Image (cartoon, grey):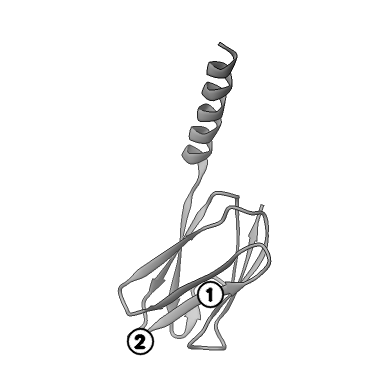
Amino acid sequence: MKNTLILSTFFALTLSGMVFAQEYEVGQKNKEFTKKSLTIKVGDTLKFINEDPFFHNVYSLSDASTFDLGSYPQGQSKSVTFDTAGEIDVDCAIHPNMHMHIVVE
């Protein structure tokens, strides 16, 4: 009975977190991110959409989240889910002037 209660509580908390997680979209247009900064919550996902007629490669080397989405062309998108609170600086490996700051609460 005790194990069932613990397992039920775990699944309820997991499902409630999934219900409240959100997906945000950030475009890449004119060699810039369409948002310079964004505040999101742990569990939220950012979808990076390439709106430029050339490749982008979104990445971060921040302690709170390290990722590299690889190169992708116009019309395609890549997503990242943020599982840890903290501050994240996002850049493009192809266009060094592209910067974005994310705060994950």
Name the residue at 35% across, 87% down: 54
Residue 91 as seen in the image, left or right of residue 25: right
Q: Residue 37 appears in which quarter of the rendering?
A: bottom right
Residue reaching furthest to the left: 75
* Residue, disc 1: 59
Secondary structure, mark 2, is loop
1 in relation to 72, above or below: above
Name the residue at 60% across, 50% down: 41
Residue 86 on image: x %, y % = 69, 59
Task: Report, in whole angstroms, how far the alpha carbon at label 1 lies from the one at label 2.
Answer: 17 Å
Residue reaching furthest to the top: 1
Which three-letter amino acid code belongs to the residue tagged 1? Answer: Tyr
Q: Verify CB contact (< 8 Å) between mark 1 and mark 2.
A: no
- The quadrant of the picture occupied by the N terminus is top right
- Front label number (1 vs 2): 1
Which three-letter amino acid code belongs to the residue tagged 2? Answer: Phe
User: Could you tell which of marks 1 and 2 lies nearer the N-terminus?
Assistant: 2
Using the image, tell me which numbered label, if any, was put on residue 103: none
Secondary structure, mark 1, is strand
Counting every numbered tag in the picture gives 2
Q: Residues within 10 Å of mark 1 (few under 14, many from 20)?
A: some
Using the image, tell me which numbered label, if any, was put on residue 54: 2
Residue 105 as seen in the image, left or right of residue 8: right
Residue 100 on image: x %, y % = 59, 73
Residue 6 on image: x %, y % = 58, 22
Residue 27 on image: x %, y % = 43, 71
23 in relation to 61, above or below: above
Q: Residues within 10 Å of mark 2 (few under 14, many from 20)?
A: some
Name the residue at 63% across, 54% down: 84
Q: Residue 28 appears in which quarter of the rendering?
A: bottom left
Name the residue at 52% across, 52% down: 44
